[in-house]
Amino acid sequence: MVETGHPRRWWVLGVMCVSLILVVAGVSSLNLAIPSIRDALDATNTELLWIFDSYALVFAGLLLPAGALGDRFGRKEALVAGFLIFMGGALAASSSGSAMQLIASRSAMGVGAALIMPATLSIITVVFPPHERAKAIAIWAGFAGAGGAIGVLGGGLLLEAFWWGSVFFINIPIAVVALVAVVAIVPTSRDENRRAFDPVGALLSMAGLTAMLFAIIEGPERGWTNGLVLGSFAAATVLLVGFIRWELRVDAPMLDPRYFRNRFFALGSVAITLSFLAMFGMFFIITQYFQFAQGHSPLAAGVRTLPFAATMVVVAPRSAAVAAKVGARRTVTAGLLVSALGMTGLGLVSPGTHYGLVVIAIILIASGLAFLMPPSTEAIVSSLPRAKAGVGSAVNDTTREVGGAVGIALLGSLLSVGYRNGLGNVTDGLPAQAAAAAEDSIGAAIQVAGQLGGEVGRALVDAAAQAFTEGMQVSMWVAAGVLVAAAGIVWYFHPDRDAVGTGTVRHETEPTSEVT
């Protein structure tokens, strides 16, 4: 079975891609719903932040233990359990009556997502033979990148016709269909050696990643020198160093740190982390640009991100053939540089920039990511023994989530600083409360302008839009710089030619997975 592949492997891939979109879109669809949630639940800015970030915090913190549980007890079983938890959280979120209830529900959805996402990639890894695996992973990676744009578009469509809770409720029927398909066609697979679970490693990784992401999320809100933020970073450092030390000495480690000595594994992780930093930060900003700086509705803003998803789905499957021909080093480096070029393009926009110019930049970003993600993902999962498919997939997913959280925090902070600097003394003549609100964000400035009306209101809207794009320019240029730096790292350290995608990188002599 391992060499010939599962007879229904392409159907399995389709189900895994649907499952993946459900998880990824669960993050991006909320971008457009935040204003409606704020009004409906009377949520504070801090509560809104945690409505958005509670999902990512729990999700990323549980990925490694969830992947290890799937390896130990069954990846299909982890997937089924994840769907059930995810659906329960989505139902509770759609009917939340308070911000705290929504935060708790989103956290539950994060638990389910942590079980689903690594299972999707690890199942693909074990049902496809080596000569088809790179192509399958490329298709999976294309949908992973497209899921963000699909979530934004879907959220816009739903908010146009239904209440804010519909962005959560829609997950339930989709998950039911996917769950039925999983039960019907997806085979059960697990580590045939049934290695002992590593509870200490699981707790240390969970606590360390959670503390690190908490600090990253709270940094822009509280300030990077705040005691709680610095304390969280310190706790994360202690816990993650403790995790590494423990994994080096335990007989059956959940994730052996020595795997990072493998340059394919390490550089794949670097490329995924930094590319998702740029991508998540870009989506966080571009949806606001379309809505607030250019005045489009949530649906119109979602439609304008659709070329990103289309490009990812079309281009990503072709990256495997390119990487096989010219090598992962050249493919990944070129992808990073093309995405950097697109980010530079977004760094030149103004409130009145024609959409045709913006969409060229979006397509460049998506094309670059579509070329770099599949070989980078393949490098991560193919560098580990097949019996560790779940953990390898979880490492890949963790790099995405950590990169995304850092991207939103870093680029969002730069956006805020640039916005406030660009606004200058425009708010000097406003009442103190109105001025403070207008200086907080462009969305609040537009609300204040609506209350003021007249020439004063119109002048504030124009100034806020211009200030926002100035902050956006700084953020996009920094994102471009990060991608160029990543390209330099990959080009310098990656072997010139490699066997990623041919099956020769994997530790084939180590135990494989039992598939039934």
Image: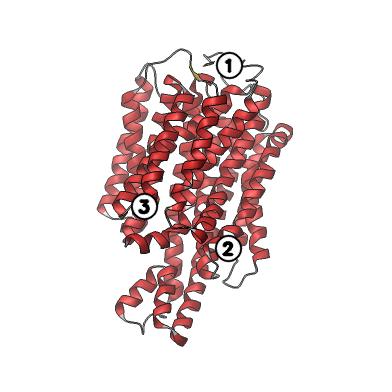
Amino acid type indicated by mark 2? Ala
> Disc 1 versus disc 3: distance between alpha carbons?
43 Å
**Split into 4 quadrants, where in the image is the C terminus?**
top right
Q: Residue furthest left?
A: 227
Q: Nearer the viewer, mark 1 or mark 2?
A: 2
x and y, in percent, of residue 296 in the image: 55, 67
Dot label at residue 240: none
Give residue 105's quadrant in the image.
Answer: top left
Q: Which residue is mark 2?
A: 300
Please tell me which of labels 1 and 3 falls first in the chain.
3
Left or right side of 200 for 469 = right
Residue drawn at (49%, 35%) of the image: 117
Label 1 crowd (10 A; few <14 / some 14-19 / many >=20): some
Label 2 crowd (10 A; few <14 / some 14-19 / many >=20): some
Q: Nearer the viewer, residue 292 or 516?
A: 516
Q: Nearer the viewer, mark 1 or mark 3?
A: 3
Q: Nearer the viewer, residue 59 or 341?
A: 59
Element under label 2? helix
Q: Which residue is mark 3?
A: 51
Q: Residue furthest right?
A: 325
Q: Which residue is mark 1?
A: 508
Amino acid type indicated by mark 3? Ile
Left or right side of 390 for 342 = right
